[in-house]
Amino acid sequence: MSPAYARVHGFDESHTRFASKYSLYLYREQGRDSLPDNDGQSLRLSGTPVLFIPGNAGSYKQVRSLASQSANSYYTELEKFKDLNPNVNSLDFFAADFNEDFTAFHGRTMLDQAEYLNDAIGFILSLYRHNPTPARSVILVGHSMGGIVARVMLSLPNYVEDSVNTIITLAAPHAAAPATFDADLLHVFAATDDFWRHGFVSLDSDDSGFSKLARRRLESVSLVSITGGLLDNMLPADYTSLTGLVPETNGFTIATTGIPGVWTPIDHLAIVWCDQLRKVLASSLLQLVDKTSVSQTYPLQKRMEILRKNLFTGFEADATQDFDSYKAGAGKLDLPYKLKIDTKQFKDTSRQRNLQLPRSKLKRNTHSSPDMHLFYIPKDGLKFKFNFLSSLKPVDISRLGEGFASPSIMLCRTLNPDGRSFKKEFDYTTGTTSKAVQLECIDIHGDAHMIPRSYSDSKSSSESSLGAEKQPFYSIQLDSRVLSMFDAVVIAESPVPVESPEFVLADLELTQSTDLILGDYSLWTLFSRGYDITLPAHRPLSISIKIPSAWSSLLAYNFDIRYQQSQMERFSPMISQRIRDETKWHINVHQDKSITALVQGVSPFCPFTRDDTSSLELQIFSDSLASDQIMDIYLTVDWFKSLKLLVLKYRLSVFSFPVFITTLVFFLQFRKYINEDVFPSFGEGLYMLCDPHVLIPLALALSVLSSFASHSFFQKLLSYIDPVDFGNKTLMHEIEKSDVFVNLYFLGLEEKALWFFGPVVLVISLSLVCAFYNLLEVLLWTIVVCLRKLHISSLFKPGMSGNYNKRRALGTALILALVPLYIPYQFPYVVSCLVQCTVVIRAFLTSPGQKHVSVETFRNFNFSLLILMLWILPVNIPVLIVWIHNFSLRWATPFSSHHNFLAIISIVFLVQNNVAGNIIPRPTSVVTIFVTKFVIVYFSLCSLIYGTRHLFWLHYLFNFLCAWLLCLLLEDVWKKQVKNVSMFKKEDTPSKLN
């Protein structure tokens, strides 16, 4: 790998307004690709353009792995790729340098990148205008948020028509935004999703101008979303799903654990440079390019077929449509071979049901003829499944016996006497043949797909992955959809004998014996006693076990497998774990082995459908022809690992649920303040919340809320007050041709049996708030003690001079004036938090002798307010980081969504009121009491129900709460009854409590 990055200096301010912030690079593999001269003007590009889009804080140099592999594959294996793709072409990789922008935190930044890339594509295509076949489109490869930027590009006004038709994304969050700190970001997601959904609905559903534009831009676009699985700790794998967004004709989602030759989970960053994956992607790209077309790629249908063949495991229902066997059966391909076979050539019987090689056998007298195995397919209405498993890769019958022991596999029909010509005829009869059969066949060696090697010494699937020393196994599985179109499966042995440890196994069995069901749909039964199943000793080579109750990605499923191994087994049992878009392999399953299945099933806040792929399916491969042992499988839930899954699924809830607890404590404090004219401490508020009369009903309410939030009626009710519209479900239904469900509220649970997650979250959130409160209190008292020891506590005590008040007012006015002009409102919020800290320190520095009720009220109120402000602080930090990053780049474009001074003015004024020492009065009238309680309760409930998917809303709710508290203060100002903490001296006696 010898990378060279040539900056494209010609793409300047005359082509894009973002030239001073972003830049474009051309990757060149030294020793392979031609390099530009020093002036950069003489390079002629003749390849197919590919644009790499880095993700959140990503680098343009991440293009190196894929670009280098593509160049090396093209120049060292050109003949191989010409066989696969006669119109193959080299790839010219471009990469965008975004100066490590934080795309995941800021919607405006995402739009800027998308606009820049559309300008870049227009410039890139201009570099090919003098070629014999000038390129009109660019292939997009996006990592993480770069995959979302790729989708945004097609929805913008400056999109170059027909310039994009292939998008491959790596760990991109298509289903939901990974961070919800910015309202603009969520609106960009929603608008982009809406555009894409309109692009795939029929004209009858919507013939608006918007839909027509979307359809014109997206009708030939293919989108593949690749996820690294559960090893990706930065992005939940469920977020990469395309459910309800792109129909299966235009895209799909796939996990790296199932991609042939990869078979491993990959973390968020490594997915860009994983060696096995980059080899698969480079091969796929080289197969789908077409240098004779102006689009530089094949039409949509062929592109999708190539991508499915390279990325699917081969066991998916959608994979069957690309099999040569299916195409031949449906009349899309001719049966190219004619076979005339002496019936003596068939091994054992013409109605064979299984095959196992090697085995002791006598060779036929005619050594030029292969031994044949015919699996007759009955036409009695019963459904059958054919399974083939071998350590040898099948070959075309025309290459049978060319120095290797690989067999050939064909699907055949009885010869139709129509007199048509064949590509080749094979006559395996002799002068002594008394009886022969004539068949027209298609060789299906191309339908064989790799699966991991599994011997008794195998340790991981990576041992037989791409680039590894050991060879994988090969499998073909045909169900009744294919078999019903043929009369027989014929396997031809090679004249070269199969020697151990190599093997060839096959069987033809009734579907009712190969497809089993473990348990029912009840999660309660799974929780209470589990499920179990016993597989008979004489079982098919491959058995599929459907588990209807295993569909939640919040649970870890434990499979305890018990059986007695046999020394005669040709391979060790292995299990394919499959659900929705994810397949995982468990190889070398020992006796009494326990397997934990973490699945990418139905996930909170993500769209999903209820169909055959929604629940977990296990496919067990075992050499039952050599072993006569039964196999017992016990299914239970691993609760400890299930709790660990909550951390990744609900990491954004770490902020919203503690805000719910804090506001609930704030409500209880205000209730006591209203009743007794004393504002209790935050610790007292927590104690009131933990009272069984409050905590138990609250836990029961959260238990019920989990179920209510998944009910369609309550979802419609909650959607009416949802601050962000997340898309048209009707469009999602039409794209998937079935009902699409998504739960965006509270915990996003669909499993009513998980009602206890509500109380669990309550306990966790309460524990976090208690820990934070105690930690903050210890920290503040430590600061107070240090200030007293250093004799500088007087700087923090109330009673500031008039000059200080003038400076404070001037500073407040200046910072508020800068918000509409340049700085985001998040900056004043951080300053307000720091100022509030000084207010609380001043309150804590109050002499122990000052025990006036108003002094205690001032201290407790401001301390509780500080706790609430600090829980909301993380919501504002990400956007502030983006602003600081842009400031460092001297990029002065303002964030339009973050310059509304009304979003911060109430908070700033309330904090300044606290600095002045004014005490928020207690509500006394019926109206003020009701409004105060309503505002706090509304804040609390919104944090609970909408908080996780609308973290940005917490800031606005807090700003509104501060505005109302200022209204309470203004009432006292009007009456000239404002209380100030400096009014109460040591000698003052406490006021009588009401």
Image (cartoon, helix red, strand yellow):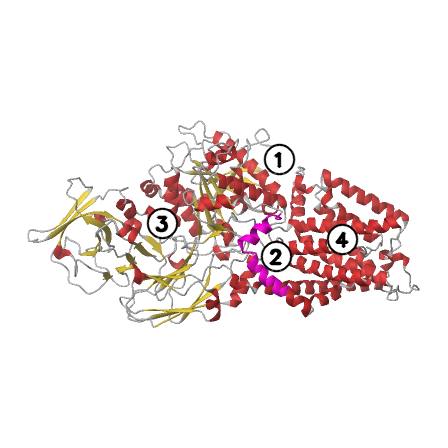
In the image, taking residue 432 as reference, residue 515 lies left or right, namely right
Relative to 347, say whether 31 is above or below.
Answer: above
Could you classify mark 4 by the number of other residues whose Cα lies within 10 Å: few (under 14), some (14-19), or many (20 or more)?
some
- Nearer-N-terminus badge (1/3): 1
Cα gap from disc 1 to disc 3, whole angstroms: 47 Å
Q: Amino acid at mark 1?
A: Ser
Q: Amino acid at mark 4?
A: Leu
- Nearer-N-terminus badge (4/3): 3
The x and y percentages for residue 326 are: 29, 47
Near-viewer residue (82 or 523): 523
Query: Which marked residue is nearer to the observer: mark 2 or mark 4?
Result: 2
The x and y percentages for residue 2 are: 47, 44
Cα gap from disc 2 to disc 4, whole angstroms: 24 Å
Near-viewer residue (771 or 170): 771
Relative to 688, say whether 75 is above or below.
Answer: above
In the image, taking residue 631 as reference, residue 892 lies left or right, namely right
Residue drawn at x 42%, y 52% is 276
What numbered label is drawn on residue 1?
A: none
**Quadrant where the image shows the C terminus:** bottom right
Q: Which residue is mark 1?
A: 20
Magenta stretch: helix, strand or loop mostly:
helix
Whether residue 841 is visible here, answered yes or no, is: yes
Could you classify mark 2 by the number of other residues whose Cα lies within 10 Å: few (under 14), some (14-19), or many (20 or more)?
many
Q: Which residue is mark 4?
A: 834
In the image, taking residue 192 as reference, residue 874 lies left or right, namely right
